[in-house]
Image: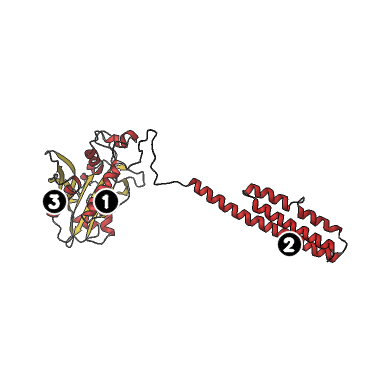
Amino acid sequence: MGRSDASRNDDIEAAVGDALGQIAGASTLEDLRAVSAGLTGKKGRLARLKAALGGIADIEERKTLGMLVNEALATVTGAVAARENELVRTSLAARVAAERIDVTEIAVGAAGSERRGRLHLVTQATERLEDVFIGLGFRIAEGPEVESDFYNFEALNMPPSHPARSMWDTLFVETDPPGSVVLRTHTSPVQIRVMQEWPPPIYAVMPGRVFRRDTPDATHMPVFHQIEGLVIDRGITFADLAGTIEAFTKAFFGSDFTSRLRPSYFPFTEPSAEFDIRRPDGSWIELGGCGMVHPHVLQAGGLDPDEWSGFAFGFGIDRMAKERHGVADLREMYSNDIRFLGQFP
Ligand code: PHE
């Protein structure tokens, strides 16, 4: 290698050293892009060194230096890519840190007052009811809101044109044949589904939304909520039903409340009753229906009435929430008025 070789070599090394310094110094992706264009572009130092190779007479010398320049360019390109990776990673981390949301943070209103979301009254009531029944050894089940005529009526001992069907003002889904699909009018169809799916003994409560063709007023809504109860075991009697309702009353309302059953009629229970809760002041709240599961219903659920017996009950959740919070008009509960909803902690 001659003198000029050595100095060209030094030039290449110096250019690489300078390039690596600039690359390391780029602190943003934009910086890096500008630096990289200057270094690897046609007017860059290495490009100029490469262009100058044309003036070298000795072919071997030109080859060797050409390789060195190419290696230098590759080194610089590699360093740019590595730095780019690094910058992308740190800018992502910075963005994640900046956009992080503290989900435990409490939003503070302008006046310094706490503004926190809360569950709807009906959701609160449903969850409390579930808690009480879980405490009594029950499990939770759910069924579909769009239901077949079979589950909503027929399996509940109401064959087509049974007069008791008129106890429920039914909303039908347009189907062919008409009338075969309904919006469930009560949660009782879930009794059948549970009997078909769970091996007995069964201790279940089934909360959910139900639908009736009703004009909204202070005590009625076309969409409301019920909770159904079903117990199936060997040797279950009416005394078990009365005892369960009383235990539930005390657990949910308090030990100074009590319950009573009045004879009534439902096609799916026999005997049937309605149950009321007595407040400490002696007044009564009408709550819901109940009774011993009818043998036809046990059969529809796939159970042998000679082996299994049970009771069922069902009542409205919205009215209980209304009662508990002293709400005058049921329609308020669904007005979505934040001033109304915000009153209940
Ligand atoms: N499903 C009945 C209703 O909606 C209530 C009920 C449930 C009655 C279970 C008896 C047994 O009116």
**Crowdedness near tag 1: few (<14), some (14–19) or many (≥20) residues, C-alpha within 10 Å:** many
Please say if 205 is above or below 114.
below
Q: Is residue 68 left or right of residue 301?
A: right
Query: Which quadrant: the C terminus?
Result: top left
Amino acid beneath label 2? Glu
Query: Would you say the beta carbon of the disc 1 residue lies within 8 angstroms of ligand 1?
Result: no
Please say if 157 is above or below 106.
below
**Crowdedness near tag 3: few (<14), some (14–19) or many (≥20) residues, C-alpha within 10 Å:** some
Amino acid beneath label 1? Met
Percent of width and height locating residue 216 = 28, 34
Q: Give the labeled residue for mark 2.
A: 71
Tell me the CA gap for discs 2 and 3: 92 Å
- Secondary element under disc 2, as helix, strand or loop, is helix
Percent of width and height locating residue 115 = 36, 38
Percent of width and height locating residue 222 = 29, 38
Chosen colour scheme: secondary structure
Tell me the CA gap for discs 3 and 1: 19 Å
- Secondary element under disc 3, as helix, strand or loop, is helix
Q: Give the labeled residue for mark 3.
A: 242
Percent of width and height locating residue 288 = 19, 44
Image disc number at residue 206: 1
Lower sequence index among marks 2 and 1: 2
Taking the view exactly as shown, the residue that stands out farthest to the right is: 57
Tell me the CA gap for discs 2 and 1: 75 Å
Q: Nearer the viewer, residue 151 or 74?
A: 74
